[in-house]
Image (cartoon, helix red, strand yellow):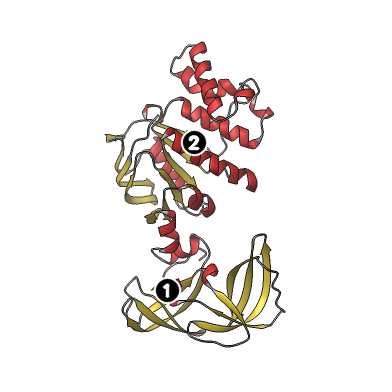
Amino acid sequence: MRGKDVILEKASVKFGDFTAVHPLDLKIQAGEFFCILGPSGCGKTTLLRMLSGFLQQTTGDVLIGGDVMNGIGPSDRPTSLIFQNLALFPLMTVWENVAFGLEMRGWAKAKRKARALELLQTVELSEQAEKTPAQLSGGQRQRVAIARALAVEPAVLLLDEPLSALDLKLRQHMRAELKQLQKTTGITFIYITHDQGEALTMSDRIAVMNEGRIEQVGTADHVYSHPANPFVATFVGENNMIRGEIIGTEGEMAVLDASQGQFRALNTHGLQTGDRAMLFVRPERMVISPGTKPDQNAMSTEFLRRDLEGAFSNVHVSCDGKEFSIHQTNVQNINYEPGEALTISFAPEAAVVMNEGVLSDE
């Protein structure tokens, strides 16, 4: 089983006057683990259904492996789709579920059972072959759905938020299993999720989607470290944001004047003096110091609370009525008193300024 590339050319989907997916151009490489990340209602499932053939695009073209898929239904495309609810057949055994697609293709029972058992070995479920789905755990049912999808030897596997119903530890385990399975098979995986942790952990590249448009495409590292706009900056990971006006630029840096102070930051978007702007800096890039000693790129704050999250904690402070968060590793137990004066600061290279735009939580 090897993957094929997927290309969208000016592809869009409309329902009456509503545009669910605006015309877009996108190329997904053969054998790539590609995530489409976005909030509920952004159009990502509609996009996946368009790729699968369950929904025909309104405009543009869909190509898989160089072949135009326009007008071709799901059963005739080199794709398999794993639904969010898995859609296993409760009265069939595990191996019968896996072999169902092969039965529809006319395979003899002995041949399709042998193939099903081979795939169950791949997903480490050989001993569960004669059980029904109800006798399996959530993670095991997930692997049955994957084996069933692989049985028809797709070039492209489409996954619609398949881990959303699992608990945290099982989701983390299944992330690693899916990534390893993708590497082993070489199939092109297109994975839909609203969970940024899944996208950052699993994908070779990510497309961030919002209101039917793709805002940015890139590797996990690039999207996290170099967001294209305020929406991406606030949707992918956490960010502290400061609004203000650009009062000067020098080389690759700009100075933002805000009610909390003046701050230097990277000016990768080419802002000019007088522009209204947003400054973004990740919580893990901010530093806390005791007392009030504001220096360059620093502000005096009051301690609000500390949220423990195991290996690290989130410290929340307030400045000029706005809350900021700082991530700290739990190498030592640091406690602050409510209202205690603290200084937070960050290096100019750790922050970026952008034109004012829509945030993910607006």
**What residue is shown with label 2?**
181
- Image quadrant for the N terminus? top left
Is residue 123 depicted above or below 195 in this figure?
Answer: above
Q: Residue 201, percent across and down?
A: 51, 50
Between disc 1 and disc 2, whose residue precedes? 2
Q: Kindly tell me whether residue 157 is visible in this rendering.
A: yes
Q: Spatial distance from mark 1 to mark 2, Cα to Cα?
A: 38 Å
Is residue 226 depicted above or below 126 in this figure?
Answer: below
Task: State the SS at label 1.
Answer: helix
**What residue is shown with label 1?**
349
Residue 321 appears left or right of 242:
right
> Label 1 amino acid?
Glu
Which of the two residues, 41 or 251, is positioned nearer the viewer here? 251
Residue 26 appears left or right of 285:
left
> Label 2 amino acid?
Leu
Residue at point 50%, 16% (across, down): 112
Q: Residue 298, percent across and down?
A: 52, 82
Residue at point 51%, 86% (across, down): 295
Residue 286 appears left or right of 250:
right
Which of the two residues, 341 or 167, is positioned nearer the viewer here? 341
